[in-house]
Image (tube, rainbow, N blue to C red):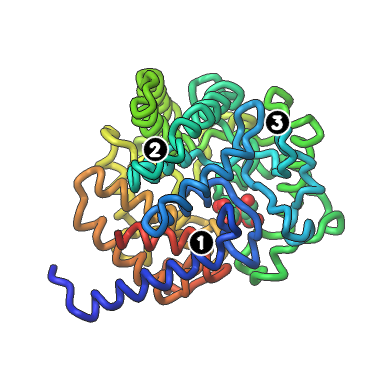
Amino acid sequence: VRATRSDRLDAAGLRHAAARVLMANWTGSSTVPSRTLYPHQWSWDSAFIALGLRHLSPRRAQRELETLLGAQWDDGRLPHIVFDAATPADAYFPGPAFWRAGPNSGVRTSGIVQPPVHALAAWQVYRADPAEAARRGFLARAYPRLAAWHRYLGTRRDLGGHGLAAIVHPWESGMDNSPCWDGPLARVEPVPPSCFRRRDLDHAASADRPTDRDYGRYVRLAADYRDHGYDDAAPHAFAVEDPAFNALLVLSELALARIAEAVGADPAPHRRRAEEVTAALLDRLWDAPGGLFLCRDLVGGGPIREHGVAGLVPLAVPGLPVAADLVRTACGERFGLGRVHMVPSYDLTGHAFDPARYWRGPSWFNIGRLVHLGLLEHGESARAEALRASMLRAAARSDFAEYIDPLTGEGHGSTGFAWTAATVLDLLA
Ligand code: 9WN
């Protein structure tokens, strides 16, 4: 397809606007997801942000990841939030006073984690400007930290004992209120809403956000984990194997193998680990009749029979033997690929589908990008191109919204959202 002059101008304008969002959200050492809702550094946001930032400033993209890696704990975990010391402590709930956590360096962090997209991002950031990366010793410094992060996930987080990393809080999935968590969360006694003050509702419509009841349960789980000293061996009321989290671990292990080669370390253990996690994904989480990966509840036992978009994310894994089934499911009635805006976060036909409420239906740009990469990986170039166009359109029309209604394309949550802008830069590169 030949681009018309106006297409070219639109792309240039969109690139410029996306760059402005990332500049406005830059704090000097990292990028906030949103100046209003999320005024600190978030773990998987930073990885997606770095993937976009590398097209503007490879050096800044390196810095983004280094700031996060600098907040790593002794046990190898990368915290899901690194608190910005210059931001008032009560700007976000739960803030540093709630988590009471951080590495010895004195940086304040949360105590839970988010999906491991970091090695994947680090490798691509390196490739954007290998000379600058070499000058700064970027990969050599990042490699041992990324390896320790993956080791943490492969050991202390293998709660099921079958080679998959488990999450112990819905926030760890990055898909906070996905209907996949409704069953496991039903066992958790919510903290009464009078015990905490939600800051998110100062900046977003309550119909777009998780409910107070969900929040009560998030707070209970986080407080229990904290009160057990963030010890993964302590009992967990919530423990789940999530296909998106583990698929991202596979992609990051493959990237870590490339990083290992580049720094003169042995790539073989990382390749082996990628194969093991892929095998465990297929063995433990693949649901052949549904043509989708399902989450597995380690506390209640058995698969969680809700069709969330986390189950499509393994499409991005190279050589995945069930890729054709996943493409069929993506294009089917549950996810409507090609017929709705981007990729909905939950089954369009599901009993809990809500097109506006956060991870219970809306389409998100980071997930759209992962499905886009998966389609490209498996030779589905026409579908990939249609999804790319849908994402660019939605970002432009919504002023870089946090997420959009898959049925109307209308933006929800905050505007000027960093990974939305970063994803646009990546798609336009
Ligand atoms: C809790 C920052 C984060 C994203 C998550 C998204 C949302 C936080 C919240 O915002 O979660 O971590 O306060 O709702 O669900 O994916 O990383 O953008």
Q: Quadrant of the N terminus?
A: bottom left
Instruction: Choose between 343 and 366: the one closer to the eye.
Output: 366
Amino acid type, mark 3: His
Along the viewing direction, whichever of 117 and 193 lies nearer the viewer? 117
Q: From what the image shows, is residue 116 above or below residue 93? A: above
In 3D space, how far apart are the residues under numbered discs 3 and 1 (Cα atoms)?
A: 33 Å
Q: With 277 as the anchor, is 35 left or right in this view?
A: right
In what quadrant does ligand 1 lie? bottom right
Q: Tell me the mark number nearer the camera, choosing from 3 and 1.
A: 1
The crowd level at tag 2 (other Cα within 10 Å; few <14, some 14-19, many 20+) is few
Q: Mark 1 belongs to which amino acid?
A: Ala
In the image, taking residue 44 as reference, residue 261 lies left or right, namely left
| Residue carrying label 1 | 418
From the viewer's side, name the closer residue of 426 and 175: 426
Query: Which residue is at 70% across, 39% downward?
Result: 111
- The tag earlier along the polypeptide, 3 or 2, is 2
Residue 290 in view in this figure = no
Q: Left or right? Give the position of 102 relative to 307.
A: right
Task: State the residue lying farthest toward the right.
Answer: 194
The image quarter in which residue 267 lies: top left
* Label 1 within 8 A of ligand 1 by Cβ: yes
Distance, label 3 to label 2, CA atoms, is 42 Å
Q: Mark 3 points at which residue?
A: 236
| Circles 3 and 2: CB atoms closer than 8 Å | no
In the image, residue 100 sits, relative to residue 274, either above or below, namely: below
Whichever of labels 2 and 1 marks the residue nearer the N terminus, that label is 2
Place of residue 427 in the rendered image (x, y in percent of width and height, measured from the top left): 32, 59
Crowdedness of circle 3 by 10 Å Cα count: few (<14), some, many (20+)? Answer: some
Q: Which residue is drawn at 75% across and 52% down?
A: 94
Q: Can residue 397 be seen in the rendering of this structure?
A: yes
